[in-house]
Image: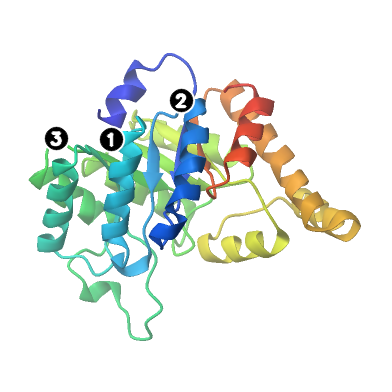
Amino acid sequence: MKIIDAMRKRTRPFYSLEFYPPKEEAQWPDFFDAVAKLKTLDPLFASVTYGAGGGSRDNTLAVAAKIRETGITPMPHLTCVNASGESLTGFLRQLKQIGVDNVMALRGDAPPIEDFSWDAGEFRYASDLVAFARANFPDICLGVAGYPGAHPESPSFASDILHTKAKLDAGADFVVTQLFFDVREYFAMVERLRGMGVTKPVVPGILPIQSLESIRRILQMCGANIPGKLYLALEDANKTGGAKAVREVGIRFAVDQIKRLIDNGAPGIHLYTLNRAAMCLRIAEEAGIA
């Protein structure tokens, strides 16, 4: 089923999930155990990532196929990195063969290569990827990413929102946001898009903070903003209770975010699961929209 059709039919807030496929098949039993446990959330869909440069694209296909067998609608990631029209056509045909009708189209992260240049590739922006997929596979459902706090390479919020709109104008069906920690950023983003005539769904993405080290690394990568009050609370927790206390602060903050988002009209919540079923189930239970 196309995710956009499921969204339109949904009459109550939903969860969707993001999974990080294990690199080795030996890790699959634990991974799919987590998938099975999180199926109790009745997720609208589950996005499936793959590594920079498309190195694990075949693995993503296999995992997406198995997720589909569980009854969860998979949405594999597809990026511009090292992509060609031929390789994308092959990937999208493979998805169609295994009954997958949905793709998350992303620019992707640049691989750690000294002379890498986006200009050298056939696809430079996610909007190029969306336009190609829509033209060659018109029936596919396409999700794209959006940045409530602006992409780290954007010169301004105004410029960034234009790029998000360009992806939707190119044929994307909905937006899933990058992680953020101030719900006002999400609603400001939605308001700006609505003011530009965009009516397509924007689903907020929530990442539960696990440690000070991980959040520092993630903030450096994606350029998200973190409220000073939250960061101080994480530092205090780390000093008094260590990693466990930090996770507790992160979970409580994620629960509060979800409640505020749903109470103010967000259509659902996209949980960056980190493949941790127990944590996600606890968050859903405490947020009250399980």
Residue occupying image coordinates x 21% and y 63%: 123
Classify mark 2: helix, strand or loop. loop
Residue 22 locus on image (x, y percent): 44, 57
Q: CA distance from mark 2 to mark 3?
A: 25 Å
Q: CA distance from mark 1 to mark 2?
A: 21 Å
Residue 207 locus on image (x, y percent): 58, 46
Q: Nearer the viewer, mark 2 or mark 3?
A: 2
Residue 173, numbered label: 1
Q: Residues within 10 Å of mark 2 (few under 14, many from 20)?
A: few
In this orientation, which residue lies closer to the viewer: 34 or 213? 34
In this orientation, which residue lies closer to the viewer: 144 or 14? 14
Q: Residues within 10 Å of mark 3 (few under 14, many from 20)?
A: few
Residue occupying image coordinates x 22% and y 54%: 129
Classify mark 1: helix, strand or loop. loop
Q: Which mark is first along the chain, 3 or 1?
A: 3
Q: Nearer the viewer, mark 1 or mark 3?
A: 3
> Which quadrant of the structure image shows residue 3?
top left
Residue 82, numbered label: none
Q: Amino acid at mark 1?
A: Asp
Residue occupying image coordinates x 41% and y 62%: 23
Q: CA distance from mark 1 to mark 3?
A: 11 Å
Residue 257 locus on image (x, y percent): 65, 35
Classify mark 3: helix, strand or loop. loop
Residue 42, numbered label: 2
Where is mark 3, residue-wise?
139
> Which quadrant of the structure image shows residue 110?
bottom left
Q: How many marks?
A: 3
Instruction: Give the quadrant of the C terminus.
Output: top right
Q: Amino acid at mark 2?
A: Asp
State the colouring used for the structure image. Answer: rainbow
Residue 28 locus on image (x, y percent): 43, 52
